[in-house]
């Protein structure tokens, strides 16, 4: 699994963001992981003096459903490349009147409404329970908050991202329930990424880019495909501006606790972890198993 390629910061692009304009000296890296292949090749390059690894979440050409994503391979691939921080961009629907299309929301909480998705590296003879009360890295959300302001992009810091199963969108009844629960935006991908990044001891934050109001809104049915595509394109352009500014704000040294998330999380007797599981998890827990 070792690779000579490396990056400091990982960027995951969602709907509408399948590449990274401005990435220089680009090289394409195809990786295999103990959990299979990631969504696509990683695009490695430099931007604003930082070394980045970009991954199109749904694959170039948008070929992979949210429920089909190999989240473990995507995050493990980032870990193989030496990534210590992940900036995730994703398209979402808004559950609030004051979070309109083209608003960038920086959620600090998640609520899981998915079914049966794998969102842990553990199992197969090794048990670990990470703390996940605060799923977003505080240093990363600070950097994104400053970056949105510097880029002149309308943004809202904080809020809860409801991660639904999909691929169908919500019913009106579901949408109204989420609003009654005081949820803020709704998407289909970020919860699993956040959990796995925490297990991999990688800092994680997401930019939830609003494309439209969810179906609770009285004007929802009047929204055209052309309007949504326009919002996707505008959001993708703004995402590049925000990323460029965020790279100046993200500290080079990590002062958060994300890098030691597993320190007290592994419960299994080290001597009883099966050899195959130990091999699969070596990149993630190897430092805690060294004698």
Image (spheres, helix red, strand yellow):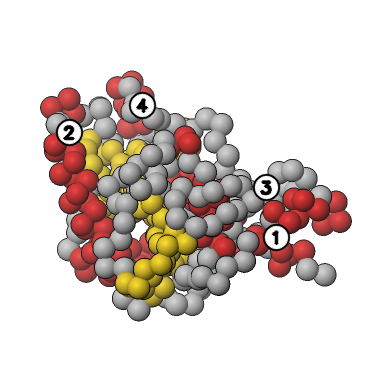
Cα separation between marks 4 and 3? 29 Å
Helix, strand or loop status at disc 2: helix
- Residue 134 seen in render: no
Residue 162 position in % (x across, y down): 40, 38
Going from N to C along the chain, the mark reached first, 2 or 4, is: 4
Cα separation between marks 1 and 2? 46 Å
Q: Residues within 10 Å of mark 1 (few under 14, many from 20)?
A: few
* Labels 4 and 3 touching (C-beta < 8 A): no
Numbered circles on residues, count? 4
Q: Which mark is residue 168?
A: 4
**In the figure, residue 214 lies in which quadrant?**
top left
Q: Which mark is residue 37?
A: none
Question: What residue is pinned by disc 3?
Answer: 122
Q: Which mark is residue 282?
A: 1
- Residue 280 seen in render: yes
Going from N to C along the chain, the mark reached first, 1 or 2, is: 2
* Labels 2 and 3 touching (C-beta < 8 A): no
Question: What residue is pinned by disc 2?
Answer: 225
User: Which residue is depicted at the point 35% across and 42% down?
Assistant: 62
Going from N to C along the chain, the mark reached first, 4 or 3, is: 3
Residue 89 position in % (x across, y down): 34, 53
Quarter holding the N terminus? bottom right
Q: Is residue 136 left or right of residue 219?
A: right
Residue 133 position in % (x across, y down): 53, 50
Residue 109 position in % (x across, y down): 43, 48
> Residue 112 versus residue 181: which sits nearer the camera?
112
Q: Residues within 10 Å of mark 3 (few under 14, many from 20)?
A: some
């Amino acid at each position: 699994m070792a690779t000579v390629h490396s990056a400091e910061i990982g960027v995951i692009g969602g709907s509408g963001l399948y590449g990274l304009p401005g990435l220089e000296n680009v090289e394409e890296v195809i990786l295999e992981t103990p959990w299979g292949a990631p969504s696509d090749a990683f695009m490695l390059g430099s931007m604003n003096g930082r070394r980045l690894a970009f991954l199109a979440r749904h694959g170039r050409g948008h070929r992979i459903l949210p429920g089909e994503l190999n989240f473990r391979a995507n995050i493990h691939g980032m870990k193989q490349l030496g990534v210590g921080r992940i900036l995730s961009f994703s398209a979402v629907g808004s559950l609030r009147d004051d979070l309109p299309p083209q608003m960038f929301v920086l959620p600090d909480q998640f609520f899981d409404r998915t079914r049966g998705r794998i969102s842990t590296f553990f199992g197969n003879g090794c048990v670990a329970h990470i703390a996940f009360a605060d799923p977003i890295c505080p240093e990363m959300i600070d950097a994104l908050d400053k970056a949105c302001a510097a880029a002149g992009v309308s943004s809202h810091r904080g809020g809860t991202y409801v991660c639904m199963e999909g691929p169908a969108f919500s019913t009106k009844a579901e949408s109204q329930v989420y609003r009654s629960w005081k949820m803020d935006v709704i998407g289909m991908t970020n919860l699993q990424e956040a959990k796995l990044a925490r297990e991999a001891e990688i800092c994680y934050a997401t930019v939830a880019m609003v494309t439209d109001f969810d179906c609770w809104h009285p004007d929802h049915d009047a929204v055209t495909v052309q309007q949504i595509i326009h919002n996707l394109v505008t959001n993708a352009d703004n995402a590049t501006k925000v990323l460029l500014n965020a790279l100046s704000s993200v500290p080079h040294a990590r002062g958060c606790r994300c890098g030691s998330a597993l320190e007290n999380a592994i419960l299994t007797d080290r001597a009883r972890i099966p050899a195959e599981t130990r091999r699969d998890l070596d990149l993630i827990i190897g430092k805690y198993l060294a004698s």
